[in-house]
Image: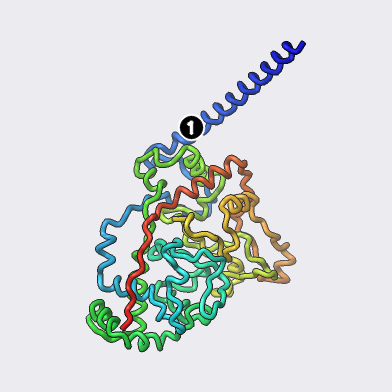
Amino acid sequence: MKFSNIKIVLFVAALSFFFMQHTIQRYRVDYGEVVDQYKQPVKFWPKPVVDGSVKWKEFEAIAWDSNYYETQELPEVLLGKKLFFDPKLSSSSQISCSSCHNPEMGWADRQEVALGNDHLQGKRNTQSLFNIGERDSYFWDGRAKTLEEQLVGPISAHNEMNMKPEKLAGKLAKYTAYRKLFKEAYQSDKITFDKIARALATFQKTIRSQPSKLDKFMNGDYKALTDKEIYGMHLFRTKAGCMNCHYGKYLTDESFHNIGLTYYKREYEDLGRYNITKDPKDVGKFKTPSLRDLNYTAPWMHNGLMDDLHGIVSLYNSGMQMINPTPDEKKADPNFPVTDHLMKPLNLTIKEQEALVDFLESMSGSYYKMPRPEIPRK
């Protein structure tokens, strides 16, 4: 009797093992069929599944700048770099641009929101400077159109560097080393705020992402990505709908969307682009961030409240549908935020979510950390 029971147990175990292996093998075969579509030049990849209103661009690989080290030695770049890391640009001489944009931290600060002058907190998450020269607008709400215009904000803000721009040139002019640097860059030792802005912008434009596994894959190294990461890329381009907003070389549409995180009339309320345009259609809209070097730039979102990619993917999977107003509610309150029509439940399985996260992590490749330069003392 005992021997028969053992045979039954062994039979059931063998049967279970067979079905398990069969299921795994079947999944692998399906997995492989999808993966094989991408192991070829990008121009032959399946077209992404996007909304009809989206003017998407295909992925494009980036390359390491072969002239990077030579560029860093150019007089204007050298000047801009020293200014960027110099706390003398703040009224207290304790806070530099690099206090919030640290090269060791993905050119951000790893905090929910920025911490500035007198330990005052900002309201929004510090954006990374990777590929900042490629942006069409600046800040989460797009209020600046050039890097030179953008930098006035953090330098003058009372809760950031708290420095009056009109006084900064005079402060730096006291240093012989700076007068010499400005003369080398601009053929005159006269220091002006416009020159300070130009030098800072020129330096920041050299801050670029380095090629990632994704770039190597697009360039023909089909072993650079695992099959799971490739499958995640397929989901990114199709079922997950990510390419509605994240596409092209830098994986952003450079536009603004309300993804349902306005927190209207609650503790974390932020009306986003509406504060600039005063157009009710812009309530709760924030700029689409680049996904390049995502691993190094946590926490994410405009308020920095999210620091786990699995959690973010799960949130998007739900559709992020906050409570949208009825027509009567919208009429009574024109500023009641409306979630972007692109936000929809994705119905991704746990396995699919895991593959998508793996792909998102494959976009990070910037291992080089810029050393801090010597700051003028005299």
What percent of the width, then of the height, locates residue 16?
65, 23
Given the image, on which type of amino acid does mark 1 rest?
Gly
Q: Quadrant of the C terminus?
A: bottom left
The one of 367 and 141 positioned closer to us in this rendering: 367
Rendered position, 308 above or below 263: above
What percent of the width, then of the height, locates residue 32?
48, 32
Residue at the spot 73% in from the left edge and 11% down from the top edge: 4
* Colour treatment of the image: rainbow
Rendered position, 331 above or below 39: below
User: Image check: 310 left or right of 35?
Assistant: right
Rendered position, 86 above or below 338: below
What percent of the width, then of the height, locates residue 123?
58, 72
Q: Quadrant of residue 257?
A: bottom right
Residue behind mark 1: 32
Mark 1 lies on a secondary structure that is: helix
Q: Quadrant of the N terminus?
A: top right
